[in-house]
Amino acid sequence: MDCDASAHFINETSAIFDYPSIFNFTHKWLLLQSDFSNDTINFLARLNINIDAEITYVDLSNDRSYKLYDVYHTGRYHHGRFIIEHLGCWDVNGGFNLLPRKYKYVQRSNMTGVVLKCMIVVRNHVKYRFTKFVSNPIDPHIDSFSRFNFALLLHLKDIYNFSFYMMRTLSWGYMQNGSFDGMVGQLERRKIDIGGSPIFFRLERAKVTGYTIQTWISRSCFIFRHPKRASIFKIYTRPLEDNVWCCIFGTVFITSTTVYLLFKIQGRIIFAADEGSLSGVLLFIFGAIFQQGMTSSLPMLSGRVVIFTIFTFSLLLYQFYSASIVSSLLMDPPRTIRTPTDLINSNLQLGVEDVPYTTNAFRQTNDEVAIQLYRKKVSNDKINNFFHPDEGLQMVKNGGFAFFVDNAVAYKIIADTFSEQQVCELSEINLFPTQKTMAIVQKHSPFRKLVTYGLRKVAESGLMARQMSIWSAKRPKCVKSIDSSKFNVTIIEFSSVLIFLLIGMIFSVFFLFLEIVNRKFN
């Protein structure tokens, strides 16, 4: 620096390479000067030097011993300070004699109260003072991963001794008319220094922002109460397998044939003369099986043995069948809707959480099933099923609705508003893989490595896990217990009986009409 042109060269270099500064970690500088004075300090302080600078200043004023200094600035444009620290010395006899030093960003951990502009994405209405809302776990399911990321930055604030100038936006940053909006756009235009909310990794964003480390893992899925019954008629056929039903009908046929033959052989009918007919025998058998009694009897011992056998068979069958129906209504229904394709083919209505990253994921996906599901049941010319989480999960609670929502948002609402039985009826179907989010800063930011190191330290110390337990709700546990006092047979279960009765009445009226016509003409 004793050269006449050195000061001019350094000044010009600092001015030309204003952003990104050439005095950063990418270049190592060794400045030599024989006259170390306050003028030298003032000259260096005016340069665009960053906190990540690699500058070693050597004082050559003593021919036999040189003093070495570490030079950096905590934030030239952020109300920081110029720092020059003694590294040690070199002398002719002993060589280098350096002072103990810590890792670079540990040594420079005191940022002397610099002010960083931070923007955080908060889309929901804030009931409290903004800084209080983002700093405290009030309603942690609202804007959860933005506030989680900001909680990590508050730990960095304590570690590095800096402060924030807070700003708010509604968008993480999406391409609009050739440029990014929201938080990413502000970072690209250098209006802010650090992102208060994490973002999903995208190639186009990586070109304009600086990624640090992964902080939050986002998982969104369809949540719905699984329909209880696939078919109203299966309620009465499900207790017995097909081969059992075949055996029962075979037994009825054999028994009817036996009784019919006994009636004919004995030739003795007690009441109606037509009870020995085939229709009379069938009524006789069905009356016994359904425990309605009978109006005729077989006086001989062989006939009474048959009657005793029929009633014993019907009693055991009735007890087993009725108990099986009750237990089938009480136990969990089979989960038949397990894939996105099953959702498309089901009778469930679908909805999606109204947030930009979810709608953007549907519009950019190449998955054919997801595209078909979106166009058929979420958004088309007739429907536009985007809802606030409270509204969407209320529809899930009412039944017949599947809602695509972030788990961190949904689980807290479910735990607060759903009953234990409704929690046990919930099913989840993944449509997209889990997405990892990362904390971001400006592209070529001098604070990137400092933030990266600090966040890793926060993670290793367990503070990140603690914040995750605060801001990410766990799925409510299903406590399986059968409480018969809360069980009600709904119209869905009862409707098949009414339909069967209606069909019987229609047939009876039809046959009555035929009998009237037959009697009139004959």
Image: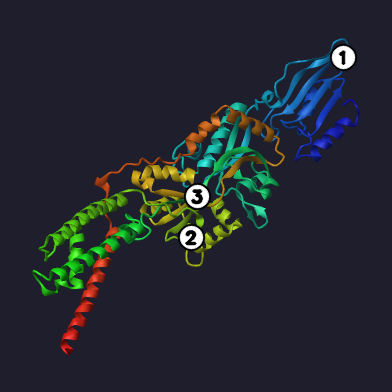
Residue at point 21%, 68% (across, down): 282
Q: Is label 3 in contact with label 2 (beta carbons under 8 Å)? A: no
Cα–Cα gap, marks 1 and 3: 70 Å
Amino acid at pointer 1: Asn
- Which residue is denoted by mark 3 in the rendering? 221
Residue 414, position in %: x, y? 40, 45
Residue 230 visible in the picture: yes
Amino acid at pointer 2: Ile
From the viewer's perspective, is the residue at label 3 or at label 2 nearer? 2
Q: In this orientation, which residue lies closer to the viewer: 123 or 246?
A: 246
Residue 333, position in %: x, y? 37, 51
Cα–Cα gap, marks 3 and 2: 15 Å
Give left or right: position of 203 versus 499: right
Residue 232 visible in the picture: no
- Which residue is denoted by mark 2 in the rendering? 344
SS state under label 2? helix
- Mark 1 or mark 3: name the one nearer the start of the chain: 1
Residue at point 65%, 30% (across, down): 453
- Which residue is denoted by mark 1 in the rendering? 62
SS state under label 1? loop
- Mark 1 or mark 2: name the one nearer the start of the chain: 1
Give left or right: position of 313 versus 296: right
- Mark 3 or mark 2: name the one nearer the start of the chain: 3
